Each structure stands twice: as structure tokens, then as C-alpha cells.
Image: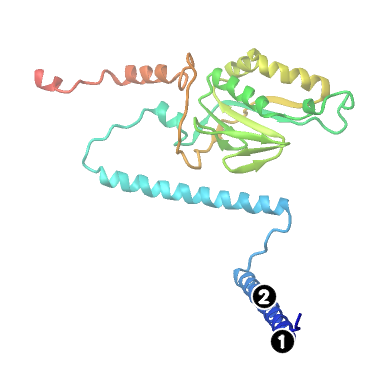
Amino acid sequence: MTDHPHRARRVVARGTLSVALVLALSGALFAANAKFARASGERHPQDLRELAQVETDRVERLSTEVDDLRAVVDDLTTRENAGTPVGEPSTAYVVEGGIVPVTGPGVTVRLDDAPADSPRREDALPDTLVVHQQDLQAVMNALWAGGAEAMTLMDQRVISTSAFQCVGNVLKLHGRVYSPPYVVQAIGNPDDLRKALNASPAVQLYLRDAAEVGLGWSVTDADQPLELAAYSGTTELGSATVPDGVEILPGLEAAEAAQRASTGPTPTPGSEDKQ
């Protein structure tokens, strides 16, 4: 077979050109990234904890923007409907929807993981040493059943579209991450709220574990009226299903009936003409 040394030289030359081109492109990319980093003036997160903090700050900033935009929409809606009679939602709907802040008597419930020096820690299962999602749900459901008019979890207003999730030993709520202890505040009659907590079987299971392994638990009446902020965040709901036999917004019909009784009957259309 005849050798063709010029083919070998051509291959080497092409390979050298390809390597040089890749190196040049890589250098350009590195230089562009460095220039962008200097221009942005931001310190980029180096680990998972810093990344979580960056995302939490971003969620808070976006939540503030959502609140500002909602205020603009409300103002534009008011101007658009100027001169046109528009029905006002009842107080119960406004409170249940978290549209306005609420102030009143109530209770504060605090749940916490078992401390490192808790008794019988070595004999207990790991799952019994931490606060779980179902524990928070049990407390909040009991408070709603006890007549709570408004509620917050970790200072975040809880409404019908709120959803939280426990991942490991942290809580995710409205795009933010929280660590224990977890604090629930509810406005309502303190005696009724306490009775509802004592009547909840799921809460009693938590209290049993709290007594055995030292889980944190406290229920305190507010010395001063609680001040719960309005809901901050999106209110869009894709879909929802209410189980059969479950009352939607408990106590709402009674509150509306009381409001109608205090303001008198609403005239029906055309009734003025018959008088």
C-alpha cells in the first residue's frame, strides 16, 4: 500500500485548528461570564443554603410586587366602575379571603422538634422526634373547627388556597422555607379554640408523643389583641374539590344572616314601584 504522508499532515493540521478554535471559544465564554459577574455586582450563591436564601429573598420581592400590582388593579377597577352600582362583599367573605388584616383575641400555638437531650430519645423512632405536616394540619383544622375567624402560620396569612408542605425538617409555605419551631396564631374565642384542640384526636396523638419524647407544645392566650396581616401572594386557583358533607367556610352563613338581620331586609327589584 502506498503511503501518503501529506494526508497525515493534513489531519494533524485540521486537528490543531479544531483544538485552537475550541480553546478560543472557551476563553471568550469565560471572559464574558467574568465581565457579566463584575457588571452585576452580585455575589453568586456557593452552596445549597445560600441558594435557598437567594430564592427566599426573590420570593419575598416578587410577593411585594404582586401586592403592589393588586393595589393598582383594585384602583383601576374602582375607577372603571365609578358611577356603576357594584355589590360589596360581606365582611365574612373579606375576612375569609384574607383581603384585609384582622385584629382580635385569640391563641398562639407553638410546636417544636424534640431537643437533643430529650428523654428516651434513643428508644424513640426518628419520626416521633420531629413535627410533621399532619401535626400542623391537625392543629389548624382543630382551630378552624373551634370557630377561628382568621389564622396565620409563621406570620403568613392562611386562606382557602394556602398549601404547605414539610420536606425533611423544614416547612415550605407560599414559596418560603421555615424551620421549627412552628407558630400558629388564630383569632377567635380563646376558650372555644382550646376546647377544639383538646377535642381533636390527631392533636391528642401529638400531645402523647410530646409527653414521651419532649416535643415542643404550648398554647397561650394573647395578652393583647392579635394582629394578623392580610394575605400576601397569588390567589389563583386551578381546581379544588370539597369532600361531601364538608361545609365551605364554616360559620359564613350564620355571619351573613346576622349581618342581614342588623341591616334589615334587602329590597327586591321593583318593590319601590309597588309602594
**Mark 1 sits on what residue?**
6
Rendering quarter of residue 165: top right
Rendering quarter of residue 156: top right
Q: Does residue 259 appear left or right of residue 236 in this picture?
A: left
User: Which circle marks residue 254 in the picture?
Assistant: none
Q: Could you tell me which residue is drawn at 89 percent across and 23 percent down?
A: 123
- Label 2: how many Cα within 10 Å (few below 14, some 14–19, many 20+): few
What x and y, as percent, mark residue 200? 64, 15
The amino acid beneath tag 2 is Val
**Mark 2 sits on what residue?**
22
Q: Could you tell me which residue is drawn at 14 percent across and 22 percent down?
A: 270
Q: Is residue 198 above or below residue 223?
A: above
Q: Is residue 129 above or below residue 253?
A: below
Q: Does residue 190 appear left or right of residue 206 in this picture?
A: left
What x and y, as percent, mark residue 108? 64, 28
How many dots with numbers?
Answer: 2
Q: Is residue 37 above or below residue 139?
A: below
Quadrant for the C terminus, please. Answer: top left
Query: Which callout, 2 or 1, points at the residue further toward the start of the chain?
Result: 1
Q: Is mark 2 on a helix, strand or loop?
A: helix
Q: Which of marks 2 and 1 is in front?
A: 1
